[in-house]
Structure formats: structure tokens, C-alpha cells
Image (tube, grey):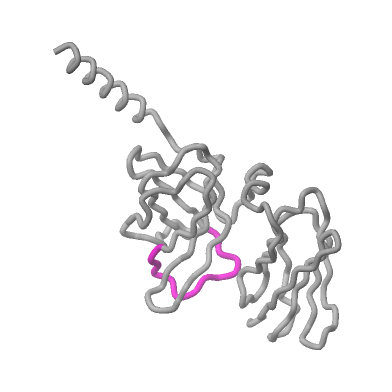
Amino acid sequence: MKKITLLFALFILFLNTNKAQTINCPAFCVLNITIDTVGSNTLNVTIYNGDTMNVNYPTVVVTNSVGDTVGNIDTAFFFFAQLAGDTIVHNIPTSLDSLNSGFTGIVYLRDGIYLSTCAFNYPMNCTVGIKELVLETNSLVIFPNPATNSININVGNLNHLNALISIYDDKGQLIKAITTATYNTSINTESLSDGIYFVTADIDGNRLKDKLVISH
């Protein structure tokens, strides 16, 4: 009888302790949102978990700038957990047929067990610590691509170095050049004509390269 009473007490303590657990929202970052229009439209929401705790049955919902739900209106979950220190692309159903390059909104992340919810304004700036953990190696990522009025260029962890970002046209002529010390740089492309361009990032003697398509 004493053993049963002790086990019951420990179980109650476990429940009370877990009820108090919440998502450590400042340790998370929404890195990117893109849209996939092949088949059923989905929003691809990339979220980094910089916390030491997992998110259980994570539910991701996206609203636009006026508060309309445009992603995961049924509030479904598609993973059993997002592990601590992990980056996951959450593919959620959307009512959108396209995503503007300047999309702004709110991304909600909810823990399905503890019912704790974070709200992130998108686009968002990550803390330095999250940048260093997520972007341990250099890689050139351009989004959106194809682009219209602006692009974001992600070059990974610069480790206190500078990156020279250059945009060339299809004839090899230099169009724009920007030096940055941040991992993510926004560049206005309104003045660029429709067509194919090449983007390079020179970092400490190493060159990263990718193709950019402009389509106004």
C-alpha cells in the first residue's frame, strides 16, 4: 500500500512539473518561409529549435499581415517532435497560390502536450547564438528564387569574417556588389531586368556561387 501511495505521489508530482513547462520562445527562430505549388499547395516553414527541450507534436500555423490564417488552418501536426538543437522544415497546407517576396505575418508554434504556444513575427532576426548554432558551415542560399523586388542571401556562419556578395548578369558583367558581416543580407532587385543572374559570395578566399532568376 505504501508503494502504491508513493508511486501515485510521484505521478502527481510529475504531472504538476510538466504542466509548468513552456516553450522557451526566444530560443527559436523562423529561418525561412517558401511555398510549394506542385500538387497540393504547401508552405515550407523552416524553424530552428535552440532550446534544450523538445517540442512535442509541434503544430505550426501561419497568418498574414492582416491576421488571416494562410497556413495550416486545421491546426494539424506532422511530426511527433522537434528535437532540441534541430532545424525542421514544417510542410503545412496553405490556401495561397503564391508567396510575395515581401511576405510578412506571424508564425505560431504550439507544443501538443504542454499546450504552450510561441508567436514569431516574420521575417525575424535571430539572436547571435542561434545563428552560430544553425549555420555552422558556409552555404549560399537565395530566397525567394525566382525573385521580383528583393532577395535574401544567406551565407551561413561568417565567424566574424566579411563576405563580398556580387551579382553578375548572364554575360558576366558585375551588376551589384555588397560587403556584409551578417549571415543574412537583403538586396533590392527592383532595378534588375527579368532574366538569369549569378550570385557569388567570397569569404576568406572561398567562393560560393548560385543562380538567381528575376521575374517581375
Q: Is residue 102 magenta?
A: yes
Placement of the N terminus among the 4 image quadrants:
top left
Q: Quadrant of the C terminus?
A: bottom right
Q: Quadrant of residue 198?
A: bottom right
Q: How many marks?
A: 0
Please report the residue visible at 68 percent of the width from the left and 61 percent of the height from the top: 154
Magenta part, dominant SS: loop
- Outermost residue toward the left in this view: 1
Judged left or right of residue 119, residue 209 is: right
Residue 151: give x, y in percent of width and height. Answer: 67, 69
Query: Percent from the top left, x then y, of residue 141?
Result: 66, 66
| Quadrant in which residue 61 is drawn | bottom left
The residue closer to the viewer here, 214 or 190, is 214
- Residue 10 place in picture, x, y as percent: 28, 20
Q: Residue furthest top?
A: 2
Left or right of residue 73: residue 177:
right
Residue depicted at 44% across the width and 50% down the height: 108
The residue at the point 45 percent across, 59 percent down is 90
Please tell me whether residue 178 belongs to the stretch shown in magenta: no
Q: Is residue 114 above or below residue 57?
A: above
Coordinates of residue 142 in the picture (x, y in percent): 66, 69
Q: Residue furthest bottom?
A: 171
Q: Which residues are magenta?
A: 92-104
In the rendered image, the vertical position of residue 105 relative to residue 207, given as above or below: above
- Position of residue 194 relative to residue 51, above or below, is below
Left/right placement of residue 105 relative to residue 172 reads left
